[in-house]
């Protein structure tokens, strides 16, 4: 597969090799001939914005400028957050809406998605917890703004 748009069923996007990603959805997995960042950028465009536009939107809403969560699509509240700097190859992107809970596993972290799917990440629990909190703040502000219009 050479193209992919993030949707409500997308759980995570992981890098697997040069210019290849593994996309995990609720019921299936895909290998895509794009980097995770390219999938994020394409999905932002598909839903009518650019990654830069979404990045600056996050900055204005919650003041975050590094490892920023991104609103991919606002009406369905599809928000993804990076596990590392998006500039790094090893950056995985996670869907906030589909996270059920996150756990500490030695010096790594474990995400349990709403489907029961478990994803082990090579980042500290504190770092993952911080990313989830940031994305949740963004989601909260987005919801409040939607109610007032």
Image (cartoon, grey):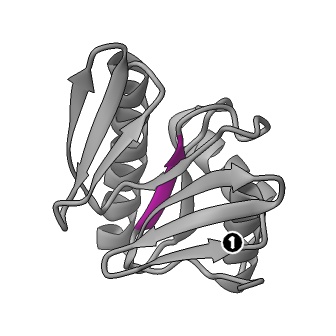
Viewer-closest of 50 and 100: 100
Secondary structure of the magenta portion, mostly? strand
Image x and y of residue 47, in percent: 64, 82
Q: Residues within 10 Å of mark 1 (few under 14, many from 20)?
A: many
Is residue 10 shown in magenta?
A: no
Query: Does residue 60 appear anywhere in the picture?
Result: yes
Image x and y of residue 124, in percent: 41, 18
Q: Looking at the figure, which quarter contains the C terminus?
A: bottom left
Q: Which residues are the magenta region?
A: 78-82
Q: Would you identify the image quadrant in which residue 31 lies?
A: bottom right
Side of 87 relative to 130 (left or right): right
| Label 1 secondary element | helix
Side of 144 relative to 3 (left or right): left
For image coordinates 74% across by 56% down, the residue present is: 37
Is residue 32 depicted above or below 11 in this figure? below
Is residue 81 shown in magenta?
A: yes
Viewer-closest of 129 and 1: 1
């Amino acid at each position: 597969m050479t193209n992919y748009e993030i949707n409500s069923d997308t759980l995570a996007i992981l890098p697997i090799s040069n210019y290849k990603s593994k996309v995990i959805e609720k019921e299936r997995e895909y290998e895509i001939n794009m980097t995770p960042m390219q999938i994020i950028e394409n999905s932002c465009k598909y839903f009518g914005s650019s990654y830069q536009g979404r990045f600056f939107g996050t900055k204005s809403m919650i003041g975050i400028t590094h490892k920023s969560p991104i609103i991919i699509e606002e009406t369905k509240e599809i928000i993804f957050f990076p596990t590392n700097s998006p500039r790094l190859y090893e950056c995985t992107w996670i869907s906030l809406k589909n996270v059920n809970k996150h756990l500490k596993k030695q010096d790594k972290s474990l995400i349990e998605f709403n489907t029961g799917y478990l994803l082990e990440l090579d980042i500290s629990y504190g770092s993952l917890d911080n990313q989830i909190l940031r994305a949740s703040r963004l989601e909260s502000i987005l919801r409040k703004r939607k109610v007032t219009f």
